[in-house]
Image (tube, helix red, strand yellow):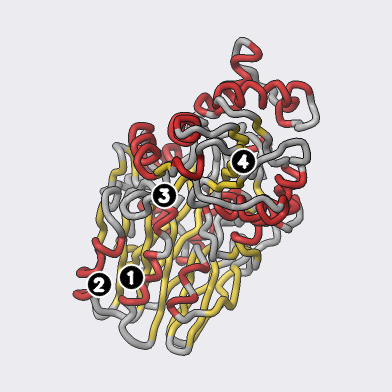
């Protein structure tokens, strides 16, 4: 996915923009971009797959001047996009995934509307959103029409002479939160961008809500709806521990997940609890607190230079990061029975080849794996994630057990069924672990604390919001 940040300040905003956007570095690995509006628009985009956002944009921000700006750390598309539109010039950044982007682009091309930006030989989705907005009778009407046209999700920030417009995805899949300090207003995907920049959260945007921030404050341009389907995976994996969505903190949810996993583990004896860094650590903290077993670090992440191994687009890059970033400590591992808390098992290749293998090679006596969410069954429709159903560890297990792919996997989604137990046993053998026990979907939803109907669980159930 992508992370977006916008700010309007009484003075030059570039320092706030630089650090506010940088606090979204865990959400994207391919491109970073900023746009600032002073007397004129100033825009810069850099490829950041091999470098930190701050190091690429520090000097750019020294040269830019303006009191309002937007920034993005993106998983796929180069942005911000600049458009000299019928409503005047604007810059735009987006976060989400558009399932019908090719169809929408073809319809615009048929109207004679051209595209100048390309991402991996396809139309740049952020430019597509800008061109769709330009079909409206006003910016607000254009955003509303864009929401109606897309299949998938899109939250956006739009910068023009009036200020920063913030529009949250109509299903609420991706969050947007407004913050305030004495001399500035800001909007962010991650509330972790606020504390060290001096902002306090004042509003979680509703699904489909549109607001505009300027020097005078915040004005609502379109009320939001109540059909909230925020991504549950934000709390389990993708979100930053210090962030809150819908007023619910990520770290506390992960601790609750770990406690729930421990309560189901009365039948095993272990010597220590470990979390796979970074996102598995809070789950392990909760497990340790509930079980009374010591939390230790048999695997330590070498943080500088290595990001998330889940987000890069190629398997080769993911494998390289997974190989290099986790360093085992044999003195802690050897001879011990270890329960390993992980946020999830997606493909299973990294856990098997670059985590479990390291533990066995260093002399672990037992390895018990505890993912904090149920088996992933479907590629996400609303964010850049696993794009092939055949990659998923659960689907590989089902294919092996059934002898072929099957369409109806409802029995395998039911944690009380015999087929579910056989699937988990198959995955455990494939991973070469002593035991494997997943979080149930009910326990996961309870840990998050939102009503079941207000969270998207498509990747586990296949049911669309």
Q: Earlier in the sequence, mark 1 or mark 2?
A: 1
Q: Secondary structure at mark 2?
A: helix
Outermost residue, right direction?
416
Q: Earlier in the sequence, mark 4 or mark 3?
A: 3
Q: Badges 1 and 2: C-beta atoms under 8 Å apart?
A: yes
Q: Residue 361, how many percent across, how many down?
A: 45, 30
In three-dimensional space, the C-alpha distance between marks 3 and 1, rounded to whole angstroms, equals 26 Å
**Residue 18 marker:** 1
Q: Residue 418, how many percent across, how many down?
A: 78, 22
Q: Which residue is mark 4?
A: 339
Does 259 appear above or below 365? below
Q: Badges 2 and 3: C-beta atoms under 8 Å apart?
A: no
**Residue 206 in which image quadrant:** bottom right
> Which of these two is toward me, 56 or 274?
274
Q: Secondary structure at mark 3?
A: strand
In three-dimensional space, the C-alpha distance between marks 2 and 3, rounded to whole angstroms, equals 30 Å
Q: Residue 441, how many percent across, how many down?
A: 72, 42
């Amino acid at each position: 996915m992508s992370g977006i940040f916008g700010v309007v300040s009484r003075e030059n905003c570039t320092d706030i923009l630089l650090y506010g956007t940088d606090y979204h570095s865990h959400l994207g690995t391919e491109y970073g971009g900023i746009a600032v509006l002073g007397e004129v628009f100033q825009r810069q985009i850099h490829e950041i797959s091999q470098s930190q956002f701050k190091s690429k944009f520090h000097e750019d921000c020294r040269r830019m001047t303006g009191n309002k700006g937007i920034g993005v750390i993106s998983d796929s598309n180069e942005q911000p996009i600049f458009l000299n539109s019928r409503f005047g010039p604007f810059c735009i950044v987006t976060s989400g995934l558009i399932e019908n982007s090719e169809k929408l682009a073809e319809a615009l091309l048929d109207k004679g509307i051209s595209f100048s930006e390309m991402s991996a030989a396809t139309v740049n989705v952020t430019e597509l959103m800008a061109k769709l907005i330009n079909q409206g009778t006003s910016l607000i009407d254009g955003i509303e029409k864009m929401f109606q046209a897309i299949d998938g999700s899109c939250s956006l920030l739009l910068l023009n002479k009036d200020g920063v417009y913030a529009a949250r995805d109509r299903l609420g899949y991706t969050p947007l939160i407004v913050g305030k300090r004495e001399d500035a207003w800001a909007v962010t995907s991650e509330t972790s961008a606020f504390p060290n920049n001096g902002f306090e959260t004042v509003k979680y945007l509703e699904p489909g809500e549109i607001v505009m921030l300027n020097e005078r404050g915040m004005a609502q341009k379109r009320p939001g709806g109540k059909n909230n389907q925020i991504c549950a995976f934000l709390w389990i994996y993708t979100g930053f521990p210090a962030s809150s969505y819908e007023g619910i903190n990520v770290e506390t949810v992960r601790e609750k997940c770990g406690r729930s996993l421990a309560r189901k583990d009365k039948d095993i004896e272990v010597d220590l609890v470990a979390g796979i860094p970074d996102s598995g650590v809070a789950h392990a903290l909760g497990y340790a607190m509930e079980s009374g077993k010591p939390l230790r670090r048999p695997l330590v992440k070498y943080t500088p230079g290595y990001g998330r191994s889940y987000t890069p687009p190629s398997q080769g890059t993911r494998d390289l990061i997974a190989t290099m970033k986790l360093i085992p400590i044999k003195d802690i591992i050897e001879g011990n029975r270890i329960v390993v808390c992980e946020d999830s098992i997606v493909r299973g290749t990294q856990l098997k080849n670059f985590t479990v293998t390291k533990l066995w090679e260093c002399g672990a006596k037992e390895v018990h794996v505890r993912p904090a969410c149920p088996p992933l069954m479907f590629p996400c429709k609303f964010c850049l994630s696993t794009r092939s159903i055949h990659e998923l560890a659960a689907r590989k297990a089902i294919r092996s057990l059934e002898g072929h792919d099957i369409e109806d996997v409802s029995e395998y989604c039911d944690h009380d069924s015999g087929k579910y137990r056989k699937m988990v046993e198959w995955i455990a053998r494939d991973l070469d672990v002593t035991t494997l026990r997943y979080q149930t979907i009910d326990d996961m939803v309870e840990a998050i604390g939102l009503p079941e109907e207000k969270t998207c669980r498509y990747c586990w159930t296949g049911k669309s919001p």
